[in-house]
């Protein structure tokens, strides 16, 4: 494995933090492990040569490939199942009432990786709606920084071992077995999801506010200040009474405008039911 000089390590760490919020300052071995093969296979003699070349590429393709290698994309179906139980037991009944006029759901999964989270979300929604599903327009935007994982997500094809946590009855309902033995998410659900590359450091432009935003297990790589700013940008594009999910190992800043609901679940509540002052902090019973 090639070794990074302090200077090249610092350049990469600074680049990832500034542009993507990802803090790699304790991940020297990870960077060396992820990039060594690429550097040698592409005929560069050192990390320095490779980094100089990537940073000088005006098309942005080289840095994109570099970033794709440095993101951590670990994910799986039904991850943190309490979130999907809460979606089904509490959020969906509320959305069904509040969105009855338009019968549209506007969801955003903001670090979708290879698709397991957005698919678990649309499957949970579909399972909740049951026979009513055809009357609803379920729209889920799934974004990630990494262009390679977005391609995998879009295809929606998984091996059987990746599906071990998927409820048995969902296997026949939501997957088609392919001739090579892998499974693909059915077209009807794949069509509910729009995949797009999006860097969470960028300004968020939403044509209309989201009913629900999930941003799980990505902010662990961000510094507190970056996290706090991102959560407040999510708040601005969440509708009144809409929700934010974060990972259970993550936290929001003390001064967030979101109201705490339960671990890793937040809600945008600006006005108390009696029309009095906005909520501050936790919902009190
Ligand atoms: C560990 S995965 C989490 C996937 C899924 N949300 C889950 O909880 O299983 C983190 C994802 O965040 C993406 N990511 C990292 N930095 C990002 C950024 N600045 N903007 C958008 N996505 C980012 C990575 O590419 C990766 O796919």
Image (cartoon, helix red, strand yellow):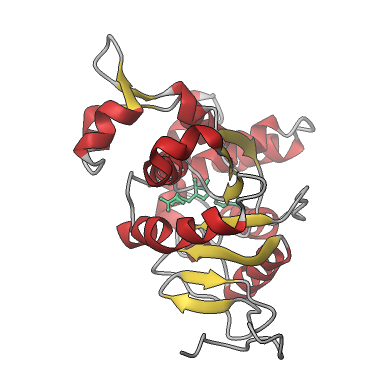
Q: Is residue 35 above or below residue 209?
A: above
Q: Which residue is drawn at 65% across and 84% down?
A: 272
118 above or below 204?
above
Q: Where is residue 270 in the image (x, y as percent from the top left)?
A: 69, 78
Residue situated in front as seen by the camera: 9 or 253: 253
Q: How many marks?
A: 0
Q: Residue at left 43%, top 43%? A: 129
Horizontal and vertical percent position of residue 100: 60, 51
Q: Which of 155 and 103 is in front in this view?
A: 103
Left or right: where 244 falls relative to 167: right
- From the top left corner, tell me how far across and down residue 261 is, in percent: 47, 76
> Is 198 in front, or is 107?
107
Image vertical order of residue 257 relative to residue 51, above or below: below
Q: Quadrant of the N terminus?
A: top left
Q: Which residue lies furthest to the top in this view?
A: 179
| x then y, percent, for residue 256 | 63, 80
Q: Can I make out residue 99 in this image? A: yes
Say whether residue 25 is visible: no
- Who's the residue at 51% across and 61% down the image? 94
In the rendered structure, the answer to whether residue 240 lies left or right of residue 29 reads: right
Dividing the picture into quadrants, the one containing residue 169 is top left
């Amino acid at each position: 494995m090639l070794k990074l000089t302090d200077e090249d390590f610092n350049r990469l760490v600074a680049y990832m933090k500034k542009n993507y919020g990802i803090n790699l300052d304790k991940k020297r071995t990870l960077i060396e492990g992820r990039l060594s093969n690429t550097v040698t296979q592409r005929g560069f003699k050192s990390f320095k040569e490779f980094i100089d070349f990537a940073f000088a590429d005006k098309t942005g393709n080289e840095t994109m490939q570099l970033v794709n290698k440095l993101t951590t994309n670990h994910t799986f179906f039904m991850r943190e199942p309490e979130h999907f139980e809460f979606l089904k037991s509490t959020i969906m009944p509320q959305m069904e009432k509040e969105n009855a006029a338009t019968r549209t759901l506007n969801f955003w999964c903001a670090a979708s990786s290879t698709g397991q989270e957005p698919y678990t979300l649309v499957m949970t929604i579909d399972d909740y709606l049951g026979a009513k599903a055809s009357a609803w327009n379920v729209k889920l935007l799934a974004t990630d920084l990494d262009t390679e994982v977005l391609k995998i997500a879009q295809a929606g094809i998984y091996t059987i071992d990746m599906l071990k946590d998927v409820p048995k009855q969902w296997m026949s309902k939501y997957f088609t077995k392919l001739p090579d033995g892998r499974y693909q998410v059915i077209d009807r659900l794949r069509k509910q999801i729009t995949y797009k590359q999006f860097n969470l450091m960028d300004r968020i432009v939403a044509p209309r506010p989201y009913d629900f935003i999930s941003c799980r297990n990505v902010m662990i790589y961000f510094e507190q200040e970056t996290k706090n700013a991102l959560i407040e940008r999510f708040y601005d594009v969440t509708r009144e009474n809409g929700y934010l999910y974060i990972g259970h190992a993550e936290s929001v800043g003390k001064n967030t405008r979101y109201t705490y609901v339960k671990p890793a679940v937040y809600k945008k509540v600006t006005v108390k039911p009696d029309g009095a002052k906005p909520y501050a902090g936790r919902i009190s019973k």
